[in-house]
Image (cartoon, rainbow, N blue to C red):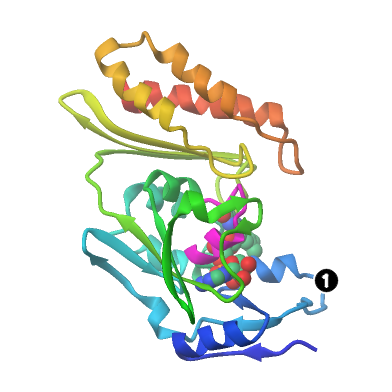
Amino acid sequence: MVKSFMPKTLAEALKICDEHDVCPIAGGTDLMVRNHQSAGILPTFTKDMLFIKNIDELTVLEKKDMHLIIGANITLNRLLNWENTPQILHLALQEMAAPAIRNMGTIAGNICNASPAGDTLPPLYALDAIVCLKSIAGERELPIREFILGPGKTALKENELLTAIKIPIGDNNINFYKKAAMRKAAAISKVSIAMTAKKEKDKIVNIAIAIGAVGPTVVRLAEAEDMFIKNNENTGKVLPDIYDVYDRQIKPIDDIRSTAKYRKQVAMNLLHYVYEKCIK
Ligand SMILES: Cc1cc2nc3c(=O)[nH]c(=O)nc-3n(C[C@H](O)[C@H](O)[C@H](O)COP(=O)(O)OP(=O)(O)OC[C@H]3O[C@@H](n4cnc5c(N)ncnc54)[C@H](O)[C@@H]3O)c2cc1C
């Protein structure tokens, strides 16, 4: 029989994490499905559960020191309705799940679930988001690309909680997000792309492109992004070289949602689309 802990403070929660082998649960929209048995039977958990939804310290949502700070208990819906949510993340949230799930699910849960198809991940990679982690021993921060190690794998230590997500406030003026899935909404991505860029006097001076569900983690290629910026002075000529970088490094797999061939083709098509519609 597993135990349930429902701490009201972060200090209490971190002490529990230190003393017990617990599984944190926020909205439960991934965990309930992952531990589902069959219709009419309650999900089965193998670890003691740490319910974190009552911890007020995890509901922070503010602008501070040139960053947006999003507490681990902030739901997807709250973020969708926050006036400061970066446009690229807002575009992804709009197409994510359905209102009932967005009312329960958190962005922290989407990150910790570490699914290559997690919809907030490409925008968060493109925005250079940072995750804030805390344990009884102290706190640390990691760029999201170092936190997510592979499908379902993160750098979270057993006694740690993700407490917040920090997003640097930027001034990019072009944002694009596209998700290819079975339906327009309430469907898991087969491929997704997030692009944020700054254009000044018709020149791209800053760009980040992140592609989801085409590898074990989100793909972001600094080499190709630098080439996009150089392409400004050399219009069109380096484009085949840029696509070649993506072509070599995008290595999707077949799974229940799609085939590697489809994913590769759609990812390359989306890159062309991003260039034609947003960058050129
Ligand atoms: C019908 C349905 C549709 C969905 N559609 C989509 C979709 O379109 N796109 C998409 O990306 N996802 C989708 N999901 C998945 C899910 O809703 C999201 O991943 C959601 O963001 C998970 O958040 P949560 O708070 O419910 O996570 P939970 O289920 O509570 O937790 C998920 C994981 O994160 C860990 N965790 C949570 N919070 C913390 C914390 N603070 N510190 C450490 N670990 C933590 C948990 O231990 C667990 O491993 C869907 C799910 C359902 C059921």
* In the foreground, 87 or 221: 221
* Quarter that holds the N terminus: bottom right
User: Looking at the image, which residue is at 61% across and 47% down?
Assistant: 116
Q: Does residue 176 sit above or below 250 in this rendering?
A: below
Residue 79 sits in quarter: bottom left
Residue 42 sits in quarter: bottom right
Ligand 1's quadrant: bottom right
Residue 61 sits in quarter: bottom left
Q: Residue furthest front?
A: 137
User: Looking at the image, which residue is at 40% across and 84% down?
Assistant: 56
Crowding around mark 1 (Cα neighbors within 10 Å: few <14, some 14 to 19, many 20+) is: few
Q: Can the viewer see residue 116? A: yes
* Quarter that holds the C terminus: top left
Q: Residue furthest top?
A: 237
Q: Does residue 241 sit above or below 271 in this rendering?
A: above
Q: Secondary structure at mark 1?
A: loop
User: Looking at the image, which residue is at 61% across and 90% down?
Assistant: 5
Residue 147 in the image, given as x and y percentages of width and height: 52, 56
Does the magenta run of residues contain 118? yes
Which stretch appears magenta? 107-120
Q: Which residue is mark 1?
A: 37
Amino acid type, mark 1: Gln
**71 to the left or right of 158:** left
* In the foreground, 125 or 278: 125
**146 to the left or right of 1:** left
Residue 80 in the image, given as x and y percentages of width and height: 39, 61
Does the magenta run of residues contain 261? no
